[in-house]
Amino acid sequence: MMDELELLKKDWQKKGEHHPKLSYDEIYRMIKKKSSSTVKWIFYISIIEFVFWAVLNLISYSKESLELEKTWHIYEITTTLTIINYIVLIYFIYKFYSNYKLISLTESSKKLMKTILNVKRTVSQYVWFNIGIFVAYLIVSLYGNLNYGESSEQIKVAASQSGNETLFWVMLFGMVLVAIAIVLILIWFFYKLLYGILLNRLRKNYNELKKLEV
């Protein structure tokens, strides 16, 4: 089913007494309205995601998990990562809101195109930051578990008894890297699904604005 912008474009191209052409400003306002709505949804979703993970962290937080992090000697690192994570996420939420307000106030197609590009860039940075912080948490947890976890001594003994300790560690880290890669791909697909549709809408709006500028 053809959306409202496509209908307006067809009307704009029609000529005749009963089908007057729509003006450049009318088409521009429609694209601006669609872009503003899309960025608003990106802003809302980022807030929902932030609240979801914050609540999940509170629910999973316990005295036992705190003691485990201290036993693994990673408490200071994970606490630092958590603080950095929340500060940066709040910054991104602010950026999404700022872009939404900027689009709402923009009265130039060139400025609107520039803002759309900034939104797409900010979303990409947001997604890669989330993936990066997850990898950092994972590496720190693996380090603590392998060096101070309950099974760390068993792993070291198995490595020394394997006959080829170097090969043992290479195979172990290889399997860990494969597992991390699979998890990262799943996370990437999650964000692709979550924000991909909205970014495609913005890309379409950007292309329409380019046509208006010709």
Image (cartoon, helix red, strand yellow):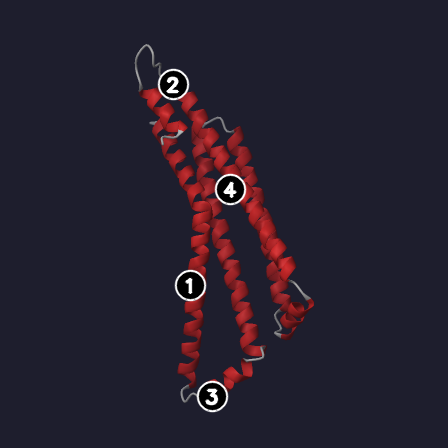
Of callouts 2 and 4, which one flags the residue occurring earlier in the amino acid sequence? 2
Quarter the C terminus occupies? top left
Q: Is 90 placed above or below 160 here? A: above
Residue of label 2: 22
Disc 2 secondary structure class: loop
Q: To which residue does mark 3 refer?
A: 160
Q: Name the N-terminal-most of marks 4 and 1.
A: 4
Residue at mark 3 to residue at mark 2: CA–CA distance: 78 Å
Q: Which residue is mark 4?
A: 42
Can you give x and y, in whole percent of width and height, for residue 64 in the image? 67, 70
How far apart, in angstroms, are the residues tagged by discs 3 and 4? 52 Å
Of labels 3 and 4, earlier in sequence is 4
**Quadrant location of residue 20?**
top left
Look at mark 1 in the image and give the residue it sits on: 182
Callout 2: few (<14), some (14-19), or many (20+) C-alpha neighbours within 10 Å? some
Q: Who is closer to the viewer here, 127 or 214?
A: 127
